[in-house]
Amino acid sequence: MRIYVPGDSAAKAVGADDVVRAILAEAARRGIEIEIVRNGTRGMIWLEPLVEIDRGAGREAFGPVTPADVPALLDGTLPGHGRVEDIAFFARQTRLTFARCGVIDPLSLADYQAHGGLAGLRRAIGMTGAGIVAEVTASGLRGRGGAGFPTGIKWKTVAEAKADRKYIVCNADEGDSGTFADRMIMEGDPFSLIEGMAIAGLGVGATKGYVYLRSEYPDAIRVMAHAVEIARSAGVLGADVLGSGRAFDMEIRKGAGAYVCGEETSLLNSLEGKRGIVRAKPPLPALEGFLGKPTVVNNVISLATVPVIFERGALAYADLGVGRSRGTVTLQIAGNVRQGGLFETAFGMSLGEVVNGIAGGTASGRPVKAVQVGGPLGAYMPVSKFDTPLGYEEFDRQGGLIGHAGLVVFDDTADMLRMARFAMEFCAIESCGKCTPCRIGAVRGVETIDRIAQGDGAAIPVLTDLCETMRDGSLCALGGFTPFPVMSALTHFPDDFSTLREAAE
């Protein structure tokens, strides 16, 4: 009997390791022969630890499982959910990037290949660099890290740059609150990222890659480092990638925990051993990036999506989506919701359908007040905007942004003035200090919101003016996007900014 218990950090945080120990002990007591596989998570976090048992007729799901449930689990009397694929949250998804996550043993290259792994790289090996870049361009893939910049254009810029060395850098410094897609795929399907980086290297002519991975993800660091060793020993990485005669190798580098190092130029400085502060652009990293050489800097999900594009074809991927947002979006649903987790679907689903139809509304049972989309620098979307389709331009027209596709839901008890203050305080704490609008503006922003909270209505126009200055004058998205949560809170929830003033009057 094969039993799957996620080794994912989220599952471990709610007791997956304890469940494994209980299963091993109970099986030993009964003299039952079992095999335990520490798979990745399926992404239904409210069911973790989600244990799957394969008795030869498919994988049955049980969860959340506690150590006390183990005897009934092995007896076959514990109530379950049937097949994972039949659970409504999972059945509604279009899983491409995350197709293998939770299914395979993350560190089994044989398992990876048995589920379609390396098919994309084998196809790319038969193509020219220009052909690889053209395929990515035709897929319509855009950066999943936040900016949504077309990946094919970035690759083309690096490919056409003249230099003796070029690099692929994966931004795995996932620091946005409410986001976990990068961690989840690195822990559950690390070879997809390795394969995507190898294809990128072949496409632009880079022979070396780095994954800049945040120190707060020890499990992801361990899994990725081990996976790189396995890939290298199997010839997926190295001087002769899969016998192609073309070279590509990579390393895992651990970040030091600064939020701003999720910004690509700060990341490059940190990767070079320097202080993680923002660089002014131009020059673009695509022309003068790591060590001054042309560098592709892509997010984890962007690179991990590349293999499936080459496996199924660019047009098959581009057939999904809405407007200029093609393919799938990996939504990370968190906050005050009944069913939080990762939900992969084609771009175009409405925000309201995600919150109410997929996540099941609030866990508190109270009405939804707002959803912050895109991390701590994303706008608060009120219920009146729930018809907005999930798409880069569609959200932009409504004053929001998709960002890294994290959604944090709040019920009607949330105080939006306090949330706006948190955004300014977050920026003040995490600012690298390079530019004045961010470094000073965020501090003044906290002070100004405190004035409003004390009933000083004259501070509201000051806050608006300050946000415009930060948006237009900051060097990077930290200062430039902080006005999104602040101004959206002020615009959509003005009553939260007037209560104390009216009371004072």
Image (cartoon, rainbow, N blue to C red):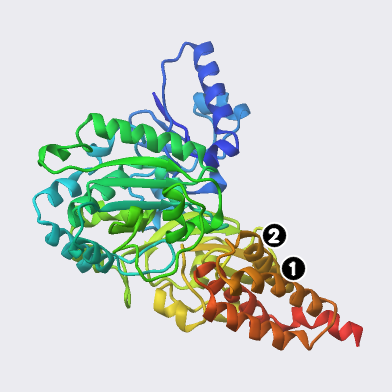
User: Which label belongs to residue 413?
Assistant: 1
Amino acid on which the number 2 mark rests in the picture = Ser
Q: Nearer the viewer, residue 325 or 295?
A: 295
Which residue is located at x 40 percent, y 70 percent? Answer: 281
Observer able to see residue 451: yes
* Disc 2 element: loop
Categorize mark 1 by other alpha carbons within 10 Å: few (<14), some (14-19), many (20+).
Answer: few
Image quarter for residue 283? bottom left
Amino acid on which the number 1 mark rests in the picture = Thr
- Asked if labels 2 and 1 touch by Cβ distance under 8 angstroms, the answer is yes
Which residue is located at x 55 percent, y 29 percent? Answer: 17
Please state if 297 lies on the left or on the right of 364 as rendered.
left
Observer able to see residue 367: no
* Disc 1 element: loop
In percent of width and height, residue 427 lies at 62, 65
Q: Quadrant of the N terminus?
A: top left
Distance of label 1 from label 2 (alpha carbons): 10 Å
Q: Which residue is mark 2?
A: 364
